[in-house]
Image (cartoon, rainbow, N blue to C red):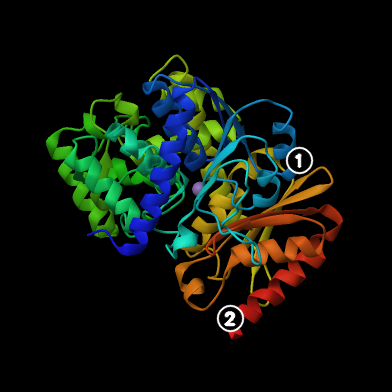
Amino acid sequence: MIQKQQLYLLNRADEACNLLRLHIEKGHVVRIISHNDADGLTSAGIFANAIKKAGGKFHITILPRLRDSNVKELNKSRYKLFIFSDMGSGNLESISKLKGDVIIADHHQVPEGVNPEIQVDNKEIIHVNPHIFNIDGTKEVSGSGLSYLSVHGYEYYELAGLALTGAYGDMQFKNGPQGINKLILDEGVANNTLVMKNELKLAYANTQTLDKSITYTYTPIINGLSGDLEKTRIFLEEHDIPKDKLLHQLSPEEYETLKNELISINEDIYGKIYTIPNIRNELTNIEEYSNLLNACGKNKEYTAAISIQMGKYQQMEYAKSLLSKYGSTMQNGIEWIKREGSIEKENIQYIYTEDKEQKKIAAAVSSIGIDLGLLPDKPILSLMKMDNLIKVSSRTTDNMIEKGVNLGVIMNQASNNFNGSGGGHNIAAGATIPANQKDNFIHLVDEMVEYQIKK
Ligand SMILES: [Mn+2]
């Protein structure tokens, strides 16, 4: 059943599709600007695939963060249609000054006090954002889902897999797909472009040997094994399961043993997985696909990430090596959290790093640290030093959201207070601040969380 609010959003996305079609028919090169995480990369991949299939041309730029200066720079070019995906809702004013038509497919919160319905006389700006229609953009649809909806008029249902891959990357699958994500899943299943099956939910199962696959699994947590390669190897040895095989290479007996043993640790380890049929083995599992793209993004290998999505696999082996390295860097990150913990304030906690490898995984391990019980359940900031700036990534849990915490609002307001910038979702948000304001920023965020909880 499609709800009324969802229908409004779908109608808005259809307007975007009509505008895109118009520009493709006129032979315009479409300018796509998207985010560097798995969600942003699949958002760009969905638009790129759709435009190519429809006979059009595109030019993609992937950015870690959209600044007003990036938007200004775009005005020097003569594109007639700009698409911002998984970003843009935080930069409506500068985007409204662009000379061409605009589609924004973004699920981030619009900053407080800004009207999301921008109207400019001489051009079209179509803002496809769930928050405008009171739909939860944190759980029910991601940038990739909105991108999928924005090309939905073309009926390229084979892109449903990428839509869910991005949503997974933004951690929208904690309780299975909901809302718009569920609609996309159902549509994919109905068109045989997505398949659901019951399977062990091991990370990287199609690309990593079992010992690593189990160690690198954090959703769900396998207590005693997640993040601990040594204990995982002992566990496999004890049960006569070869550590250097891939999951699908196990004999039926070995598979049954592994399945039962893992279920006895955490029953959530066996359940529904979402797969894309008729694609290379490494990309069948949307979770693994998402991790692969994320690893490319973290290493700024955007061309690899986009070309793999377009079915060009020259850089696949390289992408897999990045994924493998990412897995071991994550594991080192868990060791780091185990060893040093976080620095606790009254209402929040934080970790700080200047190390290049740790910066890649700080945000991810901070929330896993909470899931593993290594860290307390308080909102966590990961502070990463970049020259004169500090990049802040903040995460919290559903439990804290229920108590009133909204990190998107806090990152936006607290960073503005120190001449920085920021925003995002209630559960995960980011900011950039001048390095010399670190302690003041932490103090302010601590107070703001206290205020939100007490309100
Ligand atoms: Mn996103």
| Residue 372 shown left or right of residue 425 in the figure | left
Q: Earlier in the sequence, mark 2 or mark 1?
A: 1
Estimate the x, y position of residue 380 in percent, counting from the top left.
Answer: 61, 63
- CA distance for labels 2 and 1: 35 Å
Q: Residue at x 49, y 66 (%)?
A: 397
Above or below: residue 455 compared with residue 168: below
Per the image, label 2 sits on a secondary structure element best described as: helix
Above or below: residue 193 compared with residue 274: above
Numbered label tally:
2
**Residue farthest along the bottom direction in this orientation:** 454
Task: Please state which of residues 97 and 86 is positioned toward the viewer in this rendering.
Answer: 97
Q: Residue at x 21, y 48 (%)?
A: 259
Q: Quadrant of the N terminus?
A: bottom left
Name the image quarter holding residue 426.
bottom right
Estimate the x, y position of residue 387 in percent, counting from the top left.
Answer: 82, 42
Q: Residue at x 47, y 46 (%)?
A: 143
Give the amino acid type for the residue marked by disc 1 in the picture: Ser
Name the image quarter holding residue 448.
bottom right
The answer to whether residue 210 of the structure is visible from this angle is no
Task: Please state which of residues 118 and 219 is positioned toward the viewer in this rendering.
Answer: 118
Give the amino acid type for the residue marked by disc 2 in the picture: Ile
Q: Residues within 10 Å of mark 2 (few under 14, many from 20)?
A: some
Estimate the x, y position of residue 88 in percent, counting from the top left.
Answer: 60, 47
Which residue in the structure is indicated by mark 1?
69
Q: Which of the labelled discs sits on residue 453, or is there none?
A: 2
